[in-house]
Image (cartoon, coloured by chain):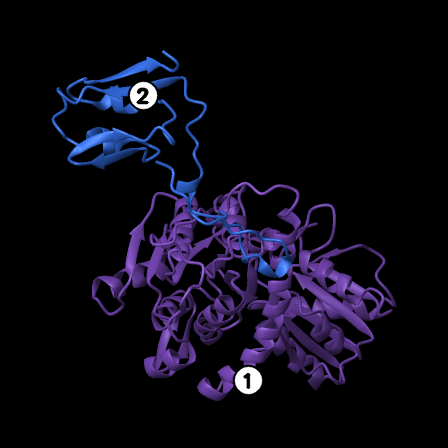
């Protein structure tokens, strides 16, 4: 069934179809409608789940950790300061190997106080052990929530579904809601082997000496490597059931492209419009949309960028005193594999729009240079 | 009383569960040895209200044959039971006396 809906509601429908059993969340702009609709769905008894109202995002994740430890499929959603408040428990969820799925609506961090999009909130949680999936359409958001549980429950690591504030969260698009029967077949009920059991009581997460701590960390890293395999494996399976294909990266006209714009989130959709226009002018430009940040898809990135003569990474985020965060990631993957010059542009922070013109300006600047003469370039800033 | 449960013993990486879990039920791991004060219940005054049992933060009060019994293998001597007892029939006395 097709329905026109906002990105936030696509998350709610995705979680409902995944038959989540516990939802614990605290409202924050621009995430509010996610939990608003979920609370209605639960209250109307269309989803058999516990909806737990909590006093903070720290508690929301704590409740999800408790629920997941007891074997329930747990879900939450947040944004920016809320995600930052969860930080300690993001580590806990991953270290305790709980397959929790959450949605994070990308909102720029304060101060200055803001509600508009950029990716610094989620990218700052890069090293917590959560998978991160960046979406560019409401359909992808709904589908990704369902796929996330499949992968998370296989490897026992949590997943964060990430989407831009307003340009996706509050934008209405036509979304195909898959049949519940199909989703049930694709995503069966989860039987958690290590769940809390009063008949066989154990404590979890207790003091671990230097004798064994590292071994548990190795297991987390191996699980993330396996997650990459599972994401690749699930892509054609999901396509067969639902007709839509989602890989770790999403290339657009990169095969013969001399210049590739590497982007993520909704900024990629705009990049594709710009690529079409530039192609009409005879310029060989392509777009590589980064979809999965963790586990990082090294092989796919190297493969997709192997023919490029110039690589431009447009970051809607910044690591102060270094590069954009996606630029660090992609450059690190290319090191020792490619000699191609990589240009890093910072654009659209705090929700400033990224227009097709933004990309034309970037391409025009890069055309004049053989290689970057600055560590990074700021786009369209006041002089 | 502490229960004797079989201890899981890990030797190799592949035997490890994915996350840290106790090697057995904590009921097999007595933790009351560092207590300074111990609660003593005057059962002749006790009204079996279960408040001490509910308030014990370490679940160290068992309910046996209709009466509270302090499990000294786990009691840390915090005194919350004595404080909360409405009949004030739990006394905290110095260990070793």
Disc 2 sits on a residue from what chain? Answer: B
Disc ID at residue A313: none
Disc 1 sits on a residue from what chain? Answer: A
Asked if residue A294 shows in the view, the reply is no
Q: Which chain is blue?
A: B
Name the residue located 54 percent from the left edge and 47 percent from the top edge: A109
Rendering coords of residue B58 (x, y %):
35, 33
Shade representing chain A: purple
Asked if residue A274 shows in the view, the reply is yes
Judging depth in this view, the residue of A141 and A192 nearest the camera is A192
Q: Is residue A70 left or right of residue B11?
A: left
- Please say if A346 is above or below A210: below
Judging depth in this view, the residue of A63 and A30 nearest the camera is A63
Q: Is residue A305 left or right of residue A166?
A: right
Residue behind mark 1? A236
- Please say if A131 is above or below A120: below
Please tell me whether mark 2 sits on a helix, a strand or a loop: loop
């Amino acid at each position: 069934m097709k329905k026109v809906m906002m990105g936030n509601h696509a998350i709610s429908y995705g979680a409902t179809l995944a038959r989540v059993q516990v939802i614990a969340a605290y409202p924050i702009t621009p995430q509010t409608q996610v939990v608003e609709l979920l609370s209605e769905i639960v209250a109307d008894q269309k989803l058999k789940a516990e909806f737990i109202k909590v006093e903070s995002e720290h508690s929301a994740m704590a409740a999800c950790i408790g629920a997941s430890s007891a074997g329930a499929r747990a879900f939450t959603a947040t944004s920016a300061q809320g995600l930052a408040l969860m930080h300690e428990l993001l580590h806990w969820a991953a270290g305790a190997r709980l397959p929790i799925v959450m949605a994070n609506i990308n909102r720029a961090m304060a101060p200055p106080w803001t509600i508009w999009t950029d990716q610094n909130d989620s990218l700052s949680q890069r090293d917590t052990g959560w998978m991160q999936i960046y979406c560019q359409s409401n359909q992808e958001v709904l589908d990704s929530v369902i796929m996330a549980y499949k992968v998370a429950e296989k490897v026992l690591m949590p997943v964060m579904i990430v989407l831009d504030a307003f340009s996706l969260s509050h934008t209405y698009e036509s979304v195909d809601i898959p049949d519940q029967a199909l989703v049930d077949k694709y995503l069966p009920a989860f039987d958690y082997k290590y769940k809390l059991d009063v008949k066989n009581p154990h404590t979890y997460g207790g003091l671990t000496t230097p004798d064994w701590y590292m071994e548990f960390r190795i297991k987390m890293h191996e699980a993330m490597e396996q997650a990459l395999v599972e994401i690749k494996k699930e892509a054609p399976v999901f396509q067969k059931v639902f007709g839509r294909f989602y890989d770790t990266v999403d290339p657009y006209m990169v095969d013969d492209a001399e210049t590739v714009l590497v982007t993520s989130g909704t900024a990629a959709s705009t990049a594709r419009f710009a690529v079409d226009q530039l192609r009409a002018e005879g310029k060989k430009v392509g777009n590589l949309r980064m979809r999965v940040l963790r586990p990082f898809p090294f092989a796919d990135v190297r493969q997709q960028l192997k023919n490029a003569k110039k690589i431009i990474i447009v970051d809607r985020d910044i690591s102060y005193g270094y590069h954009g965060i996606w630029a660090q990631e992609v450059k690190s993957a290319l090191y020792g594999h490619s000699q191609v010059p990589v240009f890093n542009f910072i654009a659209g922070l705090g929700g400033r729009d990224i227009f097709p013109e933004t990309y034309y300006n970037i391409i025009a600047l890069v055309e004049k240079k053989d290689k970057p003469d600055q560590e990074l370039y700021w786009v369209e800033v006041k002089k | 009383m502490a229960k004797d449960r079989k201890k899981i013993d890990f030797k190799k990486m592949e035997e490890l569960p994915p996350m840290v879990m106790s090697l057995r039920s904590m009921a097999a791991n007595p933790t009351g040895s560092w207590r300074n004060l111990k609660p003593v219940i005057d059962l002749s005054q006790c009204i079996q209200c279960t408040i001490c049992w509910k308030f014990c933060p370490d679940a160290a009060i068992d309910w046996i044959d209709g009466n509270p019994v302090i499990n000294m293998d786990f009691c840390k001597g915090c005194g919350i039971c004595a404080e909360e007892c409405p009949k004030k029939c739990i006394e905290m006395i110095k260990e070793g006396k």
